[in-house]
Image (spheres, rainbow, N blue to C red):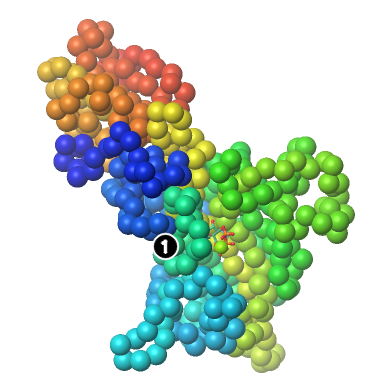
Amino acid sequence: MRFSKTFIKTLRTAPKDEIATNGALLTRAGYIHKEMAGVYDYLPLGLRVIENIKGVIREELNKLGCEEIQMSALQNPEPWEKTGRFSDQEVDIWFKTELASGGKLGLAPTHEEPITTMLKSYISSYKDLPLYVYQFQTKFRNELRAKSGILRGREFLMKDLYSFHTSEEDLDKFYAEVEQAYNRIFTRLGIGEDTFETFASGGIFSKYSHEFQTVLPVGEDTIYYNGDKSVVLNKEVLEDETLADLGVTREELTETTAAEVGNIFKLKFKYSEPLGLKYIDENNAQQNIYMGCYGIGVSRVMGVIVERFADDKGLVWPEEVAPYKYYLVGIGEEGRAVAEKFYQGREDEVLFDDRNVRPGEKFADADLMGLPYRIVISDKTLAEDAAEITNRATGENKLINLSELNNL
Ligand code: ATP
Ligand code: MG
């Protein structure tokens, strides 16, 4: 990408109403634009980050045999009424609207009801199971507070996966595979070391569900962990019975704040039964279908990565997430010419700052935008037949020979 050709502009200061670090930095660096509290647009750089996060998740889920779909955001109330979840008393974050022709609609806050209903058209026999289906989809939630930038949106991107099984053992087996996949995903996204699988309340059918919580000063949740962080639990389940189950004492646990980046749930028959999703077994008998659901807050993960790695100069992206790998600056006539040549054919991994502005401004924007490596080619480096390459995260910089540069 050529900086001179994009419409984005960086800002020296953040808008006054943007109090969260992630929102402020992403706005200043030209990644997002705020429409209103909790509602953001993703600009070219921000969209590339989102697509990279989706790419990692997609790769890991496809390895498990999951199939990607995309369901509608507009919701027919009918299936939700069957589970009682269209009621504002049950689910207090609905955005609802009305059809011009009469009748109510909702904007999907999640998709258990519609997917369970939709699959009634496709699942009939034990031969159709197991089935694992996921999507990346915009969810709408009328959240009371939306002051955390993209960590909590009223419109946000979620990956939601749903699994369907003939037995509890099969559900358990798949659940364990998703746990592994989630660990791989968060590691690849750069937050593996700070993200812990956390015991959470399980609802009706299983004692515990699990959340994936990233330790973060601005996280809205509180979690508790033991010395080697092998046992982590959230506030909802911090009680004597849980402590006994997990073999820890309250004194061993340290409290910290964290942000929930994902969660996994064994639903068993919670939705399949009221919605009538059943299958015929080998003996021609009708049976209930076991379900699981598995979420990741894709846009929240982007915000968490920002909060985790940003420094006083701006954003810092892990390599798998960064919109581009290199921020390229050519200084002086020859420096620009060599940079131009290096850029050719690397449009997809290089952000070429070809603007007519002072080098100092380019360096400040390079720091603000947070691409993993900055490459500077100037008369000074060319005198040594080299370019300077700087690691944004560590600040480490070195000269690399031009022939080496061209092999990057
Ligand atoms: P929270 O407790 O943070 O409100 P939740 O329990 O309501 O989350 P789920 O309904 O299970 O979350 O959604 C799955 C994932 O979507 C969450 O783990 C979180 O990462 C993300 N998520 C939930 N609500 C929001 C939101 N308002 N904005 C951004 N991401 C969200
Ligand atoms: Mg919520």
Image coords of residue 352 (percent x, y): 23, 32
Residue 116 appears left or right of 21: right
- Camera-nearest residue between 392 and 66: 392
* Image label count: 1
- Camera-nearest residue between 329 and 277: 329
Image coords of residue 232 (percent x, y): 73, 48
Q: Is residue 376 among what the camera can see?
A: yes
Q: Is residue 345 among what the camera can see?
A: no
Name above or below for residue 286 compared with residue 255.
below
Image coords of residue 248 (percent x, y): 84, 47
Name above or below for residue 60 compared with residue 120.
above
> Ligand 2 sits in which quadrant?
bottom right
* Residue at left offset 44%, top offset 67%: 140
Q: Which quadrant holds the C terminus?
A: top left
Image coords of residue 267 (percent x, y): 66, 72
Residue pointed to by mark 1: 155
Q: Which quadrant holds the N terminus?
A: top left
Q: Amino acid at mark 1?
A: Glu
Question: Dot 1 lies on which element?
Answer: strand
- Among the 4 quarters of the image, the one containing residue 377: top left
* Residue at left offset 31%, top offset 26%: 364
Name above or below for residue 331 compared with residue 301.
above
Residue 100 appears left or right of 218: left
